[in-house]
Image (tube, rainbow, N blue to C red):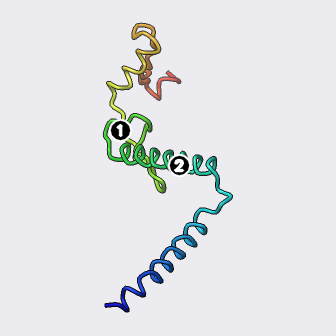
Amino acid sequence: HQAAFAAAPAIMMAMRQAWTKTMKTLFPERWGRTELNRLSWAVALVTLAKWTWDDEAASQTRKWFQEAPTLLGTPQARTLEAAEMEQWNSAYVPKEQQLVWKQPEKKDPEAWYK
């Protein structure tokens, strides 16, 4: 047992040196408070964007994107209902003032020479 206790300080010293070397490699001394503050803001913004993206992709009622977001490929657009289009139109122009397209009357193609 004495040999194990004698080696313990050497092991602890080696672990401390390895930890110090790892921390100096990951976070150099030139990284001050400002750089770490910027890094934390970047991590927070990336996390927020990921949460928003996941929520919008899974949601049926979208708040930020008109379509379900996709990174690659065709957007997953939803169909627009006629009632929804009428509601949008009435928000811009009252129903009475809206222009309405009417199909022209069908004429007899042979009537031009009669």
Q: Is residue 74 left or right of residue 5?
A: right
> From what the image shows, is residue 104 above or below residue 40?
above
Residue lying at the far front of the rendered structure: 2
> From what the image shows, is residue 15 above or below residue 112?
below
Q: Which residue is mark 1?
A: 79
Residue lying at the far top of the rendered structure: 96
Disc number placed over residue 12 in the picture, else none: none
Residue at 45% in and 78% down: 12
Residue 5 appears in which quarter of the rendering?
Answer: bottom left
Q: Which residue is mark 2?
A: 40
Residue at 37% in and 36% down: 62
Please rate how many residues cluster around mark 2, counting C-alpha atoms within 10 Å: few if below 14, some from 14 to 19, many from 20: few
In percent of width and height, residue 75 lies at 44, 48
Mark found first going from the N terminus, 2 or 1: 2
Residue at 55% in and 70% down: 20
Q: Amino acid at mark 1?
A: Thr
Q: Nearer the viewer, residue 9 or 109?
A: 9
Q: Quadrant of the N terminus?
A: bottom left
Residue at 39% in and 34% down: 63
Q: Nearer the viewer, residue 95 or 110?
A: 95
Tell me the SS state at disc 1: loop
